[in-house]
């Protein structure tokens, strides 16, 4: 339930790392407050001197709509009575050094189409889902009680329109679904659909984790795609990238002028092979952000599973690093203990809320018990697999 001003319990849980539906508090939400219609905005920027909003609703003049700090841990909040569905916006972050940063909303539900990089106010409520029987059966049955045959596909490469442009989610709901069913597949596995700036990355370097990419249409268009899959008997799996993220200046990188979502330790901050930043899995707020994001795709888009990308980058401190470029854990080993705890908690929470989910680890290392339950010392995935499309 989305309230106007975040309540103390939500704030406490977010900073504790256990607010698993944080997208209901942070980001932009349309509602009525004190008799006025508008939107609330909430973001996390603990080291900022000031946070303001600029957007279509105020002529991109951030001084008109400052946010107020509502927690010692750095949550900022504002209600903007003139904000409307479809408005573009960004956060203006005044850093401790007085620098001005323009940042997309980490919890935005929609974004401008590249090369635009602003966030967009968008409601995800009200889509007329028709897949209730599919969801009921999924949650009642073990997902691998019958054979699985998974078709991995990049929506932007599978087929193009007559003008050479991408097919939309609604276009794909026809041709792609029919093709997959004709070939005997039980599930589609879609390469990452979180918003990303570079087509060539195929979505593996994201900037907007809660915004389904606008390349192929609107959030409601993607809901239509998933709904169509389910009504025709086809499951939907998303590739999901919780280990690292894109460096683009308008995204998560140095969000409040400091290493916030990423590690501050230079020996852990980057994966140089991919030119990306690694999530700081020791920060409770980052855990709230990531686990909430996993649940978000199940909750609001009805997906059936996540294929967690690059698990080795989460599990090993020396991944992609030479000797002397990494620091051992407190036991002297190369295991990322924070990463292990994150993956275990991730799987516990996904199966708590969606017991019929598929949680697939993309891992080709010798890590033991990847698909064993957490209570027996495993990572908690129900499938360990790596495959090529």
Image (spheres, rainbow, N blue to C red):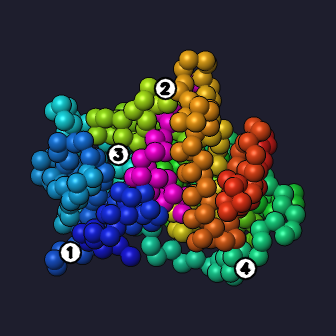
Residue wearing tag 1: 33
The disc placed on residue 140 is 4
The disc placed on residue 267 is 2
Q: Position of residue 206 (x, y in %)?
A: 50, 42
The quarter of the image holding the C terminus is: top right
Is residue 24 in view from this perspective?
yes
- Camera-near label (2 vs 1) is 2
Q: Is residue 2 above or below residue 46?
A: below
- Camera-near label (2 vs 3) is 2
Q: Position of residue 18 (x, y in %)?
A: 44, 62
Which badge, 2 or 1, comes first in the chain's sequence?
A: 1
Residue stretch in magenta = 272-295
Real-space Cα separation, disc 4 to disc 1, in angstroms: 40 Å
Residue with the most extreme front position? 331
Q: Residue at x 73, y 50 (%)?
A: 370
Q: Are marks 4 and 1 in contact (CB under 8 Å)?
A: no
At mark 4, the secondary structure is: helix
């Amino acid at each position: 339930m989305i309230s106007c001003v975040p309540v103390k319990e939500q704030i406490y849980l977010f900073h504790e790392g256990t607010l698993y539906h944080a997208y209901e508090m942070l980001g932009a939400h349309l509602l009525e407050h004190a008799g006025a219609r508008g939107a609330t905005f909430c973001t996390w920027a603990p080291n900022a001197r000031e946070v303001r909003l600029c957007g279509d609703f105020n002529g991109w003049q951030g001084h008109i709509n400052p946010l107020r700090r509502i927690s010692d841990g750095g949550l900022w909040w504002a209600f903007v009575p003139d904000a409307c569905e479809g408005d573009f916006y960004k956060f203006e972050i005044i850093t401790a050094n007085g620098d001005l940063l323009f940042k997309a909303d980490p919890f935005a539900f929609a974004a401008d189409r590249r090369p635009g990089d602003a966030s967009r106010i968008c409601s995800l409520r009200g889509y007329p889902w028709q897949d209730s029987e599919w969801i009921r059966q999924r949650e009642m049955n073990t997902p691998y009680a019958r054979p699985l045959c998974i078709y991995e596909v990049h929506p932007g490469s599978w087929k193009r329109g007559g003008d050479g442009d991408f097919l939309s989610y609604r276009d794909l709901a026809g041709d792609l679904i029919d093709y997959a069913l004709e070939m005997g597949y039980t599930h589609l596995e879609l390469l990452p659909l979180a918003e990303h700036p570079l087509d060539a990355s195929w979505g593996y370097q994201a900037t907007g984790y809660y915004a389904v990419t606008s390349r192929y249409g609107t959030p409601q268009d993607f809901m239509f795609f998933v709904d169509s899959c389910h009504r025709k008997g086809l499951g939907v799996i998303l590739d999901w990238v919780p280990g690292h993220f894109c460096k683009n200046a308008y995204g998560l990188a140095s969000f409040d002028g400091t290493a916030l979502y990423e590690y501050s330790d230079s020996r852990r901050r980057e994966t140089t092979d991919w030119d990306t930043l690694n999530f700081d899995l020791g920060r409770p707020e980052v855990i709230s952000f990531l686990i909430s994001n996993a649940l978000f795709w199940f909750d609001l888009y009805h997906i059936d599973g996540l294929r967690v990308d690059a698990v080795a980058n989460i599990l090993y401190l020396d991944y992609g690093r030479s000797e002397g470029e990494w620091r051992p854990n407190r036991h002297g080993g190369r295991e990322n203990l924070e990463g292990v705890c994150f993956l275990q908690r991730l799987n516990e929470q996904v199966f708590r809320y969606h017991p019929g989910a598929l949680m697939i680890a993309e891992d080709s290392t010798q890590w033991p018990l990847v698909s064993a339950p957490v209570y027996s010392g495993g990572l908690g995935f129900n499938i360990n697999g790596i495959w090529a499309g």
